[in-house]
């Protein structure tokens, strides 16, 4: 079938696949380095307990066959190895069917992790990676032309990511409609970056331009992805630019980077690299791609209906394989930043003069003099959940007390997730958590004190607790 492939996108496919493999690499590395404390056999939310509670059809996973920390580590590090090889271009040196199997194995491995990750893996960029990774299986390699149907499915995915985020904002918080959300967002976002203080201190007029530009790029530009070239390439380029702005202003794991990767697939590579003649795809490949496209179009019904609904949901999967999902972010923007500060003491008897020492997290605000760091695309799962816990104890119900228990035990895997452990020699006798209001310092405060944050005590979150 002559219409099936398009040589003009050979470079776009190559860049997309290498970049997607790099995102996979970061995701598997994050899992390998953090899982023991979060979901391991002695983790805060152990996988074996989850597998006993939840039916297999609701969370299919390789770990249904067997779970041990050693096996999880094998899965995660195997994912790292396979991803790194794809970044180096291994799939283009293999027969088509082997390359497809390689991408499929990556998808199965990460699906197995996400489906047992529970609260720690409840982020939209997990399902976004799975959906993009599934489509990558059917993109082929240098042995065939890029299949047009899969390229259009990638644009449909990018459209839902951007348009869904735009709709959730315009339907949500009033500040998006009056262009004032950016007065607060850079300060109250889950994990500020090293430039967030400077973004927050931009003039309010600049913040209004930011908000207006966001509406244009998320509500208008995505429609142009389906226009003829070079219009579609211009639309994709605008999305890339706005995502890089978000990369500079905060830490959103691999969400922004993966959105950029999706936008790269819509670029017409022939504009910069010229056409390259590739052989047509074998008949069996064409049949498989057409069948998968038909399936995904049917499954797109509920996500499409969600976009049109007045009760639009954010970041929802409609099937346990996460094949076609809904996306969106920051329908509501907080005006006040609340942070949990976790403290411990080695004094067995508490009194008025008890000395408490703070645990420091890697990414979330703590020490007011410490400049926020850039971690994205690496995902600090505990730090993100601490932000949610400060918003409401409901978000911390399942994991916060196990976290405190492991601090009292001096659990090494848990302590590795932190920036500083104030009790290097022996665990504390008591641990408590207090809620503070944080705000960025003004320019004058910054010059006088050297602090990036100012904080005010709000209330006790968890009373002093010790092991039974």
Image: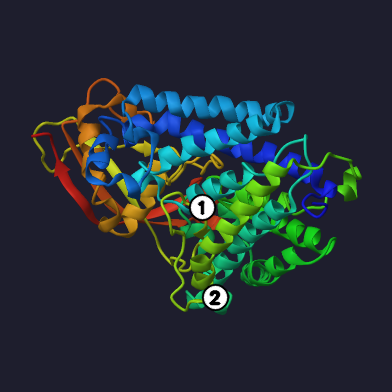
Quarter of the figure that contains the C terminus: top left
Direction from residue 247 to residue 38 in the image, left or right: left
Residue beneath the point at 55% across and 50% down: 131
Give percent across and percent down for residue 191. Answer: 48, 49
Residue beneath the point at 54% across and 28% down: 80
Give percent across and percent down for residue 187. Answer: 50, 58
Question: Quick one: which residue is furthest to the right in this view?
Answer: 274
Direction from residue 197 to residue 44 in the image, left or right: left
Question: Quick one: which residue is furthest to the front in this view?
Answer: 283
Residue beneath the point at 37% across and 42% down: 117
Question: Dot 2 corresponds to which residue?
Answer: 170
Marked residue nearer the N-terminal end (2 or 1): 2
Find residue 362 and report its image quarter: top left
Q: Label 1, secondary structure: give it.
A: loop
Of circles 2 and 1, the one toward us is 1
Give percent across and percent down for residue 215. Answer: 63, 71
Give percent across and percent down for residue 289. Answer: 65, 49
Question: Dot 1 corresponds to which residue?
Answer: 323
| Label 2 crowd bin: few (<14), some (14–19), many (20+), radius 10 Å | some
* Towards the viewer: 27 or 283: 283
What is the distance, in whole Å, between disc 2 and disc 1 at their CAs?
A: 26 Å
Mark 2 touches mark 1? (CB < 8 Å)? no
User: Would residue 135 be seen by someone viewing this image from the given angle?
Assistant: yes
* Towards the viewer: 284 or 7: 284
User: Would residue 366 be seen by someone viewing this image from the given angle?
Assistant: no
């Amino acid at each position: 079938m002559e219409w099936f492939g398009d040589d003009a996108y050979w470079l776009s496919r190559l860049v997309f696949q290498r970049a997607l493999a790099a995102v996979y690499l970061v995701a598997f590395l994050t899992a390998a380095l953090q899982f023991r404390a979060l979901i391991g056999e002695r983790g805060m939310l152990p996988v074996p307990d989850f597998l006993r509670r939840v039916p297999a059809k609701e969370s299919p996973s390789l770990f249904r066959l067997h779970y041990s920390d050693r096996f999880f580590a094998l899965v995660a590090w195997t994912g790292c190895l396979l991803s790194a090889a794809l970044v180096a271009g291994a799939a283009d040196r293999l027969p088509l069917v082997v390359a497809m199997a390689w991408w499929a194995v990556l998808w199965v491995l990460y699906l197995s992790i996400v489906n047992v990750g529970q609260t720690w893996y409840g982020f939209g960029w997990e399902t976004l990676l799975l959906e993009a990774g599934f489509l990558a299986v059917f993109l082929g390699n240098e042995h065939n032309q890029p299949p047009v149907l899969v390229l259009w499915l990638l644009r449909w995915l990018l459209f839902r990511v951007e348009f869904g985020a735009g709709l959730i904002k315009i339907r949500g918080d009033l500040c998006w409609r009056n262009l004032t959300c950016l007065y607060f967002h850079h300060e109250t976002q889950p994990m500020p970056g090293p430039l967030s203080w400077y973004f927050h201190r931009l003039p309010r007029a600049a913040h209004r331009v930011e908000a207006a530009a966001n509406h244009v790029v998320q509500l208008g530009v995505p429609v142009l992805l389906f226009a003829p070239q070079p219009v579609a390439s211009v639309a994709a380029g605008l999305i890339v630019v706005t995502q890089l702005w978000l990369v500079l202003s905060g830490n959103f794991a691999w969400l922004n980077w993966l959105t950029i990767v999706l936008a790269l697939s819509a670029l017409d590579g022939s504009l910069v690299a010229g056409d390259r003649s590739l052989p047509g795809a074998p008949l069996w490949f064409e049949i498989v791609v057409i069948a998968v496209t038909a399936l995904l179009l049917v499954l797109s019904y509920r996500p499409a209906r969600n976009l049109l609904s007045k009760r639009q949901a954010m970041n929802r999967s409609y099937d346990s394989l996460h094949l076609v999902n809904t996306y969106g972010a920051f329908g509501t923007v907080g005006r006040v930043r609340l942070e949990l500060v976790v403290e411990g003491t080695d004094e067995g008897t508490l009194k008025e003069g008890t000395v408490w020492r703070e645990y420091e997290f890697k990414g979330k605000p703590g020490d007011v003099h410490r400049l926020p760091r850039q971690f994205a695309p690496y995902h600090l799962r505990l730090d993100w959940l601490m932000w949610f816990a400060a918003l409401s104890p409901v978000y911390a119900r399942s994991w916060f007390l196990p976290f405190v228990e492991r601090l009292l035990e001096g659990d090494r895997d848990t302590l590795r997730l932190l920036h500083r452990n104030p009790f290097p020699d022996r665990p504390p006798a008591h641990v408590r958590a207090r809620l503070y209001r944080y705000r960025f310092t003004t320019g004058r405060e910054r010059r006088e004190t050297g602090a990036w944050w100012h904080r005010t005590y709000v209330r006790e979150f968890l009373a002093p607790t010790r092991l039974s």
